[in-house]
Image (cartoon, rainbow, N blue to C red):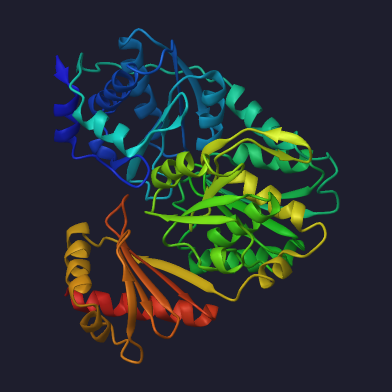
Amino acid sequence: MLVSSEVIKKSGIKFGTSGARGLVEQFTADACAAFAHAFITSIRLNFKFKQVAIAIDNRPSSPSMAQACAKAIEQLGLEVVYYGVVPTPALAYVSMQDNIPCIMVTGSHIPFDRNGLKFYRPDGEITKTDEQAILDSSVEFEAITDLSELAINNKASVLYVERYTSLFNSQMLTGKRIGIYEHSSAGRDLYKPMFEALGAEVIALERSDKFVPIDTEAVSDADKQKAKSWSKEYNLDFIFSTDGDGDRPLVADENGDWLRGDILGLLCADMMNMDALAVPVSCNTSIESCKRFNHVTRTKIGSPYVIAEFDVLSKQYDSVAGFEANGGFLLGSDILVNNKVIKALPTRDAVLPALMLLAAAKETPICELVNHLPLRFTHSDRIQNFATEKSLDILTKATDNTSNFLLQLKCDETEVESIDTTDGLRINLDSGDIIHFRPSGNAPELRCYAESSTVDHAIYLVNHVLENIQQISC
């Protein structure tokens, strides 16, 4: 017999900002089973259920990981409902409606040699406390000796599409030409028929048989150029894409310019007349300065922290939502859209903000909607293959002497006004610019976010400081 806590510890897999992440070779059948046993056992004290749902992304390693989790669930005497390749929010939504827990096999945007597991209780995404309970749980289970193919149920796909097409008139997008950058997104088979059901003419773009690690928070120069070229070649009004598991949107306007995720979230929340927001500290400060919301709370980076704030806000405000700099939109309360109720979905979702932006753009072009916001621009990028320990050491020293850190970064034309250590190190400069460093919770990467009064200067700041960070670390 194996013990879940021992197997998990030996695997080296850790929880990141959202879910357990690690190298593919760490996710052995027994490691996957250990996580599944620990998760189900830890929530059985508070929930009653007879089924557990599973879905996957398009990574080569995901099917076998799902099969291992399914074996563990069957060892516990529970029935497995397998939805195949669907977006994470589709799995979360159908499971919440059925009041059962679920496991999503996905590494989101990280490279294909890595993968992960996301866990949802019957009432939604697990908390940081739940994560610790999984790690601490010591469940005995039999080693996984064989894996079996899983029969696919299409209920999650059907309900997810209906959730959004039911909100709008079937002609809402008539006359719009929409490009879907499909790559290897988990939702690529759903998006084209979804937008077509709302009247759009849809052009499918660049489907890939190989997994493509799209990071909506650090869009590559190649993808920026693709969007501009597609927009011009196909005369597109809008381009829609997501990260690997379909919970973070990547959308481009009429000119083929990708929108920052927090700007998309701001426009969506405004269109939905939200009262209160919970957003990570890395988001654009125009969220507050636009004065379109009654309250904004800043949290640590990661959907569990945003969701945790919903409980506080819901006691004071009628409508609550959150979003992240990477674009994922989280709906914290049931609300009315076109006099129809859309139920809360407190996990990252890519489709809702895209559709709400398109609804707003019926009267005003997307680029104008963006230009009407306060002129604060953000940019982000990261250094890949940068050890977390190295990042933490650099930022610890930088926090102790931030002025000296700025000199090392060759930012000697401005001074520190204040710092924020809510998550990483966020430096507010007397020039009005902001530079924010944070080790990734999902991979060995050091992320940098910058905010300035022009997009060019925000880009310059990120490139400049990351270049000098690498010199410091040598």
Residue at horizontal 82%, vertical 46%?
172
Residue 300 vs 255, above or below: the answer is: above
Residue 5 vs 315, above or below: the answer is: above
Residue at horizontal 27%, vertical 34%?
27
- The residue closer to the viewer here, 385 or 291, is 291
Q: Is residue 246 visible?
A: no
Q: Where is residue 183 in the image (x, y as percent from the top left)?
A: 55, 49
In which quadrant will I find the C terminus?
A: bottom left
- 464 lies left or right of 82: left
Residue at horizontal 46%, vertical 50%?
212
Q: Position of residue 50 (x, y in %)?
A: 43, 10
- 30 lies left or right of 382: left
Q: In which quarter of the image is residue 455?
A: bottom right
- 6 lies left or right of 196: left
Q: Position of residue 280 (x, y in %)?
A: 43, 56
Residue at horizontal 37%, vertical 54%?
300
In which quadrant will I find the N terminus?
A: top left
Q: Is residue 43 visible?
A: yes
Number of numbered tags placed on the structure image: 0
As drawn, which residue projects farthest toward the top? 77
